[in-house]
Image (cartoon, grey):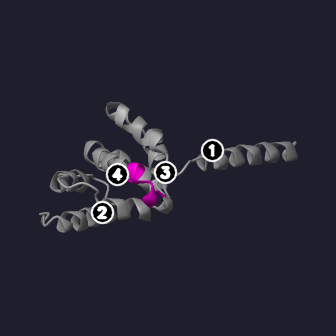
């Protein structure tokens, strides 16, 4: 009986691991899904989108531009959700690099900064995102207050 129970637990845990790793990098379709569901964003949608970021995506221009713009859109619309997803991702350095290097000018860095600062739970990822926004704004000659 114990062996059967342990086997079931192992199978369940392995299926969770495989389902979490099922992510195609540079998949522009995930950015489309986010943009089509901006008013109904949830943890899974944002998580599925953020998992598509990869170093190899630099060479995929359409993906790089649209994913970066989408990242800023969801940061502005639902920063708490982005924070909660990023807290669950072990390696979020690439997301921070994307925040530091916006592909378009004119994002409202101050507004995004304020929304993320207003989040009541202060976390390490929150601090890193705020630092990344300051870097992005400085590149455009904007000072965040």
Look at mark 3 in the image and give the residue it sits on.
26
Verify CB contact (< 8 Å) between mark 4 and mark 3: no
Residue sitting at 39 percent across and 49 percent down? 62
Q: Secondary structure at mark 3?
A: loop
Look at mark 1 in the image and give the residue it sits on.
19
Q: Secondary structure at mark 4?
A: helix
Q: Earlier in the sequence, mark 1 or mark 3?
A: 1
Residue sitting at 34 percent across and 51 percent down? 65
Q: Earlier in the sequence, mark 1 or mark 2?
A: 1
Q: Secondary structure at mark 2?
A: loop
Q: Secondary structure at mark 1?
A: helix
Asked where in the image residue 1 lies, by quadrant, the reply is top right
From what the image shows, is residue 143 above or below residue 19?
below
Which circle marks residue 65 in the picture?
A: 4
Q: Nearer the viewer, mark 1 or mark 4?
A: 4
Looking at the rendered image, the quarter that the C terminus falls into is: bottom left
Q: Earlier in the sequence, mark 4 or mark 3?
A: 3
Give residue 69's position: percent from left, percent from top: 31, 49
Spatial CA span between label 1 and label 2: 30 Å
Q: Nearer the viewer, mark 1 or mark 2?
A: 2
Residue sitting at 86 percent across and 47 percent down? 3
Q: Earlier in the sequence, mark 1 or mark 4?
A: 1
Asked where in the image residue 12 lies, by quadrant, the reply is top right
Residue sitting at 40 percent across and 53 percent down? 61
Q: Nearer the viewer, mark 1 or mark 3?
A: 3
Residue range highlighted in magenta? 57-65
The residue carrying pointer 4 sits among few (fewer than 14), some (14 to 19) or many (20 or more) residues within 10 Å by Cα, namely: some
From what the image shows, is residue 106 above or below residue 140?
above
Q: Earlier in the sequence, mark 2 or mark 3?
A: 3
The residue carrying pointer 1 sits among few (fewer than 14), some (14 to 19) or many (20 or more) residues within 10 Å by Cα, namely: few
Q: Camera-side residue: 69 or 112?
A: 69
**Residue 84 is at least partly visible in this image:** no
């Amino acid at each position: 009986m114990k062996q059967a129970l342990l086997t079931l637990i192992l199978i369940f845990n392995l299926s969770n691991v495989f389902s979490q790793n099922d992510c195609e990098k540079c998949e522009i379709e995930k950015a489309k899904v986010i943009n089509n569901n901006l008013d109904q964003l949830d943890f899974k949608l944002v998580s599925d989108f953020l998992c598509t970021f990869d170093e190899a995506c630099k060479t995929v221009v359409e993906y790089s531009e649209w994913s970066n713009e989408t990242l800023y859109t969801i940061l502005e619309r639902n920063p708490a959700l982005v924070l909660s997803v990023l807290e669950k991702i072990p390696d979020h350095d690439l997301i921070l690099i994307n925040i530091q290097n916006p592909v378009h000018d004119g994002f409202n860095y101050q507004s995004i900064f304020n929304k993320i600062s207003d989040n009541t739970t202060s976390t390490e990822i929150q601090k890193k995102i705020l630092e990344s926004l300051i870097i992005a704004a400085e590149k455009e000659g904007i000072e965040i207050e």
